[in-house]
Amino acid sequence: MDFLNLMVFLLSVAGCCFGQNALPPGPVEGVIGKNVTFTTVVSPGDYLTVSWTFNGGSGLVAVVTHAPGGRNYGPGYEGKVLLNSTNGVLKLGPLTAKDSGDYTLNMINNMGKSTTGETTLKVLEPVSAVTIKSSLTEAVEINSTVVLTCTSKGSFLKYAWLNGSAPVTPDGTHVTLSADSRNLTVSAVLRTDLVGPIYCAVSNSLESEKSAPFNLTVHFGPENIAMTINPTGEFVRKGSNLTLTCSAKSSPAAQFKWIHNGVERKETDPTLVLANVDKSQAGNITCMAFNPKTMRYLSAQVVKFTVIEAISGTKITGPNPTLVAGNSTASLKCSATAGTMVTQAWMKDGKPLLSSNRVNVSGDSSQVTISPVQKEDSGEYKCQMTNAVSKEEATHKMVVYYGPEEVKVTGENGVEITESVNLKCVAKSLPAATFVWKFNGTLTQVTSPDYVMEGAVYKNTGIYTCEATNAITGLTMSAAHLLSVKEEGALDEGLSDGAIAGIIIAVLVIVAAIIAGVVYMRRKQTIESPY
């Protein structure tokens, strides 16, 4: 009796003792090339026979039978199965696609009671060759629609998409998935949609595999164009270098054009240097960015600049070197040999020079006129010339001659005979005054500011007149001093009222005569203005 007939016979002998549910609910799944284990829900024990059969659609085939006479294997199963005869657990493998089908377990114990069960084995092809294919090798932002397709080998596959580590969530319009999730479509793609890397994850109930990372290049721009200019500002110094830099956000990097006064320049670098600029280069300039992938242009804001020559050769001319207080007019003129003057200002001794009743600053501040000059007009005059790119200044030291004035004589009014006398003449004057002395109207040999007598005698009594003269102004001023020489001890007694009155009258007469002489001299000598 062959194996199959023996199994049928044993089942018929079992009769009313037939039992079910030896196996857990199926199906059982396995992977080609790997092992699968058929577990049971049977309590371990001694069984007379344990057998597994297989029906793959071509008829019933014995897999393995354990009986008192030993263990028998069906064709092709020896070395491929491992049976636990105490509980019926069967290990099968390595699996092939032909192993898919229905498996039946039958167990008979020593009492003749039979336990059986059936299940189905699904042998799955392993997940492999997971690949992403794109409808585009590169995309243009907003303009392009991208379709990513996931391909894979395997059985009972499921598809999912990942953007980095986060699942791709379709929104039904911009991002959509096909019914089987194999196709991911992004309409009007943005650079932020597939920043990636993108993965396709494929799985079945037993295995999963992820594709190699995929990165889609999304071209965009140019945008955020900006142009900088160095040095900054609207005004550029003639002869200097002007550096302009153009930048834009773009993928791929933008190409640049420069438009100068409406004419396209040959330079295409993002940095343009205008060397040694002159006034002919002044005007308008802008840059333009171009993306050869998106075919989009973008222009920067037009920048206007003016080329200005720096001020140089600033100087002050005038006035006549000989200026006499109260009699001369001073005129100072400020000019430069090169450059465009925008503002001009005058300073005197570090303070702003303003117009007054004697000082006139011209409307354009190019000239200052002082008429007549006074001694307080002496000092340092500074002219400051300024434009947008430079500042220069020139200085002039102006001297105003004056005096003599405030002439006075100091010294003793009375001395006793043989006493020394020291009279001093002082006067304010520029240049310093020269002096002569007169005694009772007669010129003496004394020409110093000091009139000194070592031992006075009676005949030294009289009026001493100091005349101060300024060689440049031509003016002479004088002052008189009365000296009285007394006998020894006379000064201790003092003078009588009558004597004092007589002396005062005499002094007044002499002073009046001196003043009349000075007035006469001034009328005869006229000081000509240097202007």
Image (tube, grey):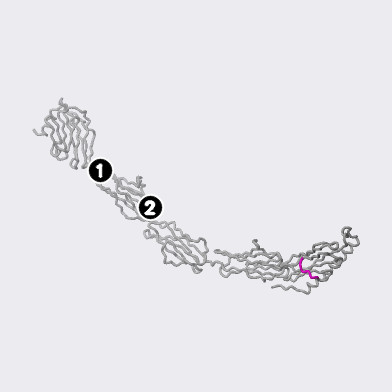
Residue 454 percent location from the top left of the image: 81, 64
Identify residue type, mark 1: Phe
Can residue 90 be seen here?
yes
Residue sitting farthest toward the top = 111
For residue 445: magenta?
Answer: yes
Q: In the visual, does 185 lie left or right of 154? A: right
Taken as a whole, is the magenta stretch helix, strand or loop?
loop
Q: Classify the position of the N terminus by image quarter.
A: top left
Q: In the visual, does 382 lie left or right of 235? A: right
Image quadrant in which you'd find residue 158: top left
Q: Nearer the viewer, residue 88 or 493?
A: 493
What is the number of the mark on residue 191?
2
Q: In the visual, does 433 lie left or right of 494? A: left
Q: Which residue is mark 1?
A: 156
Residue 371 percent location from the top left of the image: 70, 68
Q: Nearer the viewer, residue 17 or 191?
A: 191
Decide which of tag 2 and tag 1 comes sooner along the chain.
Answer: 1
Mark 1 secondary-structure assignment: loop
Residue 74 percent location from the top left of the image: 13, 37
- Write the residue at 65% across / 64% down: 380
Q: Is residue 45 above or below residue 512?
A: above
Residue 65 percent location from the top left of the image: 14, 33
**Tag 2–tag 1 contact (CB < 8 Å):** no
Q: Which residues are magenta?
A: 444-449
Q: Classify the position of the C terminus by image quarter.
A: bottom right
Q: Nearer the viewer, residue 370 or 131?
A: 370
Identify residue type, mark 2: Arg
- Circle 2 crowding by C-alpha within 10 Å: few under 14, some 14–19, many from 20: some
Mark closer to the observer (2, 1) = 2
